Image (tube, rainbow, N blue to C red):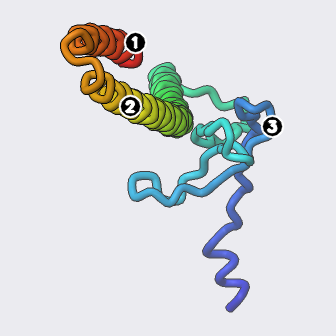
Amino acid sequence: MASSANSSNPPQPWVRYSNKDCFCGRECQIVISDSKTNLNRLYYACKLNKCRFYKWCEPVNEDSSSELPVEFDFDSRFGKIEEDVNDMIMIHAAEMEDTRVVTRETYFEMKKEVDEITAEMKKYFENEVYEMKKEFETKNTSMRTDLKLIEETMKMELEKHGQTVKIIHLLIISMILVLGCMLFTKVA
């Protein structure tokens, strides 16, 4: 029975494929397609999957004595060109995707840096404004205390000297107000 099986199914000849190099310059691996449209079809691919090289495998014709018809040769060449164009489109799409990923990563890194710098600047300016307010309040409190002392002194002098002191008192208060306004405009 084993002999009848061998006689009905003659052994199939070996199919040979040539070696190809990918864009990285390394020898490609041969992979079996699992897509619905090209199920079990062989193709070349980059071993490291870096350059995303992709090309369909074509068997090497060892019988050079058989000539192909011109139409068949043209059709096969046209098919090769079409495959090459499709390969180039796939490679270009993969490169575009890689560029998009790198660009997106760069964008997020730069955004993070800008956000950090913005937060630092905000904190710095908030501290500066706080310190300026604190300094202004200290000077303002000091000026009010000085004005109260002058006012009390003036009242005491006014009680002692009467009318002459009232005029001097008014002049001093006017000068103090002018000086206070000048200081306030410098601080603000």
- Left or right relative to 40: residue 16: right
From the viewer's side, name the closer residue of 122 and 89. 122
What residue occupies the far right of the structure in this picture? Answer: 26
Kindly report which numbered mark, 2 or 1, lies closer to the viewer in this rendering: 2
How would you rate the neighbour count of disc 1 (Cα within 10 Å): few for under 14, some for 14-19, many for 20 or more?
few
Residue name at image x 45 percent, y 57 percent: 35
Label 2 residue SS: helix
Dot 1 falls on a residue whose secondary structure is helix
Coordinates of residue 103 in the picture (x, y in percent): 51, 31
Which amino acid, by three-letter code, is at mark 2?
A: Leu
Tell which tag, 2 or 3, sits nearer the viewer.
2
Q: Earlier in the sequence, mark 2 or mark 3?
A: 3
* Quadrant of residue 145 within the rendered picture: top left
Quarter of the image with the N terminus is: bottom right
* Left or right position of 158 against 48: left
Within-10-Å neighbours for mark 3: few <14, some 14–19, many 20+: few
The residue tagged 1 is: 186
Can see residue 98? no
Which residue is drawn at the image coordinates 80% and 40% (left, top)?
27
Disc 2 and disc 1 in contact, CB within 8 angstroms:
no
Rounded to the nearest angstrom, the CA distance separating label 2 from label 3 is 92 Å
Task: Report x, y in % for residue 6.
Answer: 69, 77
Residue at label 2?
149
- From the viewer's perspective, is 18 left or right of 87? right
Tell whether 11 sits left or right of 164: right
Q: Is residue 69 above or below residue 3?
A: above
State the residue position of label 3.
26
First in sequence: mark 2 vs mark 1:
2
